[in-house]
Image: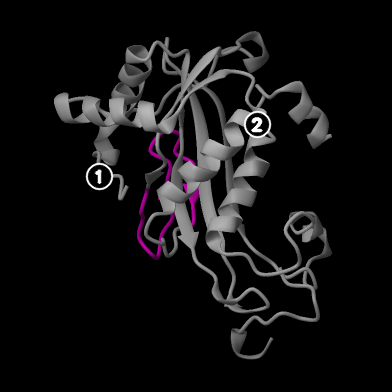
């Protein structure tokens, strides 16, 4: 691939969280018992927050401290992931869901009316207000759009984002997981074939790539419906 330009080979291709992140939240503790001992029945889902770091360095999760490589971020990255989560979560989660539209409005109001609250405090206050057992919080660190067509791309889609389930009673992180990948051509890595089986052999938009990644991420969530667990096996 001369000049560093990627092309389809044959048919094989593939906040600003300005909530005071440095001082706004303390690193939450990890759950002190296996998640299997605890089952959330009602979970509030917050809108994805965009976390932006310097081009030369990594950006860290404001909740867990996990490090990710930043990159170009399309407008509406968070909303794209919100839409995907809204589609995926009811299919796989065995708990009752308080949707982004409802939980996000409460979270925003908490931040406006209580400006002294740090991020974690606002998350927990939102969960308490909605009488939820836990709050699902996600951050997006990179959401880079494909450059080119579905069958000839100069640059593939690339995304990095996570999900964190926070227990409302004590702020413990009961589960966390992430997706941090750039699409590869099938001809370069045969192991990525499974990513294309349902959608065809082509270069995806970053919205499609994020949707694929979010589905994979939720397959690793402990509190899944039995049908979802069997499908993932």
Q: Secondary structure at mark 2?
A: helix
Query: Would residue 26 appear left or right of 167 to someone viewing this image?
Result: left
Q: Nearer the viewer, residue 29 or 80?
A: 80
Q: Quadrant of residue 56?
A: bottom left
Pointer 1 or 2: first along the chain: 1
Q: Residue at x 63, y 16 (%)?
A: 35
Relative height, residue 147 to residue 124 (above, below)? below
217 part of magenta stretch: no
Query: Percent position (x, y) of residue 163?
Result: 52, 36
Q: Secondary structure at mark 1?
A: loop
Query: In this rendering, does residue 122 appear at all?
Result: yes
Relative height, residue 151 to residue 82 (above, below)? below
Q: Quadrant of residue 182?
A: bottom right
Query: Would residue 24 appear left or right of 114 to someone viewing this image?
Result: right
Please name the residue that numbered disc 2 is placed on.
91
Quarter of the image where the N terminus is located: bottom right
Q: Nearer the viewer, residue 87 or 148?
A: 87
Quarter of the image where the C terminus is located: top right
Please name the residue that numbered disc 1 is placed on.
18
Q: Residue at x 82, y 29 (%)?
A: 230
For disc 1, the neighbor class at 10 Å (few under 14, some 14 to 19, many from 20) is few
Q: Quadrant of residue 169?
A: top left
Q: Which residues are magenta?
A: 51-69
Q: Residue at x 60, y 12 (%)?
A: 39
Query: Percent position (x, y) of residue 209?
Result: 60, 57
For disc 2, the neighbor class at 10 Å (few under 14, some 14 to 19, many from 20) is few
Query: Percent position (x, y) of residue 164?
Result: 50, 31
Q: How many marks?
A: 2
């Amino acid at each position: 691939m001369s000049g560093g330009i990627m092309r389809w080979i044959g048919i094989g291709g593939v906040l600003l969280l300005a909530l005071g992140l440095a001082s706004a939240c303390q690193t939450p503790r990890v759950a002190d018992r296996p998640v299997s001992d605890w089952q959330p029945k009602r979970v509030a889902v917050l809108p994805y927050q965009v976390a932006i770091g310097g081009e030369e360095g990594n950006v860290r999760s404001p909740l867990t401290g996990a490090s990710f490589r930043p990159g170009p971020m399309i407008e509406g990255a968070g909303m794209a992931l919100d839409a995907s989560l809204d589609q995926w979560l009811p299919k796989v989660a065995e708990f009752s869901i308080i949707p982004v539209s409802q939980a996000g409005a409460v979270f925003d109001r908490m931040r406006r009316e209580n400006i002294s609250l740090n991020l974690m405090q606002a998350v927990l206050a939102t969960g308490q207000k909605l009488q939820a057992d836990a709050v699902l919080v996600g951050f997006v660190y990179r959401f880079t759009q494909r450059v080119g067509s579905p069958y000839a791309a100069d640059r593939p889609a690339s995304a990095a984002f996570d999900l964190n389930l926070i227990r409302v009673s004590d702020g413990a992180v009961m589960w966390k997981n992430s997706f941090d990948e750039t699409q590869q051509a099938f001809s370069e890595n045969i192991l990525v074939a499974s990513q294309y089986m349902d959608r065809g052999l082509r270069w995806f938009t970053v919205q499609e790539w994020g949707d694929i990644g979010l589905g994979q991420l939720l397959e690793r969530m402990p509190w899944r419906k039995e049908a979802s667990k069997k499908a993932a096996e």
